[in-house]
Amino acid sequence: AQKITQTQPGMFVQEKEAVTLDCTYDTSDQSYGLFWYKQPSSGEMIFLIYQGSYDEQNATEGRYSLNFQKARKSANLVISASQLGDSAMYFCAMREGSLGAGTASKLTFGTGTRLQVTL
Amino acid sequence: ETGVTQTPRHLVMGMTNKKSLKCEQHLGHNAMYWYKQSAKKPLELMFVYSLEERVENNSVPSRFSPECPNSSHLFLHLHTLQPEDSALYLCASSQTGNSGNTIYFGEGSWLTVV
């Protein structure tokens, strides 16, 4: 079974509107982290937002918020007030297990959602 | 400007060539990574260097050889590649044990094997 599932290959949103990008995950670990990245056509992966499995509040970073529903194992990204510059691929990723002092973060990525912001 | 820089940004090489991708991080992190991104496939972790220890994905062919001389520099040595190795290669870094342990990526190196 896939660990990270992004069911929307592509999405359109009008400028200034909000959009939700879906992400569901599968893990048996109690401790894990969920990440969202943005990838413009240039190729760089840009970190957007992080949610820890024990965090009780939904993470927010500016126009980005993460709708974390632990029981449903979903971690949807909400972008408010979309801008033309938001057009890009968006990837959901998960780190499983707790962090030790020397533990590197091995992420598993979904297949991504291509977001197109229109006028 | 990203704290992780990769060179070259674009590379075209023949199947008999030997080339290297270079990555440098300016974030003071102690773990570095190579990821491969092929068309229509999820990003695939190739190698991890953490506190001078190397962890690799056993499915990565031996024609890819990583080198991490220190915590700021990471190389990916390429030799006798195949056309299916054409992909975007992303370098990344993080601080181990850190809350969130967020991975920060470079801009990637686009590799074409002809």
Image (cartoon, coloured by chain):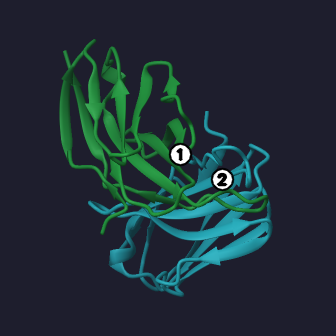
Chain colours: A green, B cyan
Q: Position of residue A38 (x, y in %)?
A: 42, 39
As measured in the structure, the alpha-carbon distance from the residue carrying label 2 to the one carrying label 1 is 22 Å
For the point 20% across and 44% down, the residue is A8
Give left or right: position of A66 versus A96. Answer: left
Secondary structure of the residue carrying tag 2 is strand
* Quadrant in the picture for residue B32: bottom right
The residue positioned 37% from the left and 62% from the top of the image is A3
Q: Secondary structure at mark 1?
A: loop
Q: Is residue A9 left or right of residue B68?
A: left
Amino acid type indicated by mark 2: Ser
- Local packing at callout 2 (Cα closer than 10 Å; few below 14, some 14-19, many 20+) is many
- Residue A110, above or below B76: above
Residue B3 is labelled as: none
Q: Could you tell me which quadrant the N terminus of chain A lies in?
A: bottom left
| Chain bearing mark 2 | B
Q: The disc labelled 1 sits on which kind of residue?
A: Ser
Residue occupied by mark 1? A53
Instruction: For marks 2 and 1, give the one nearer the viewer.
Output: 1
Mark 2 lies on residue: B93
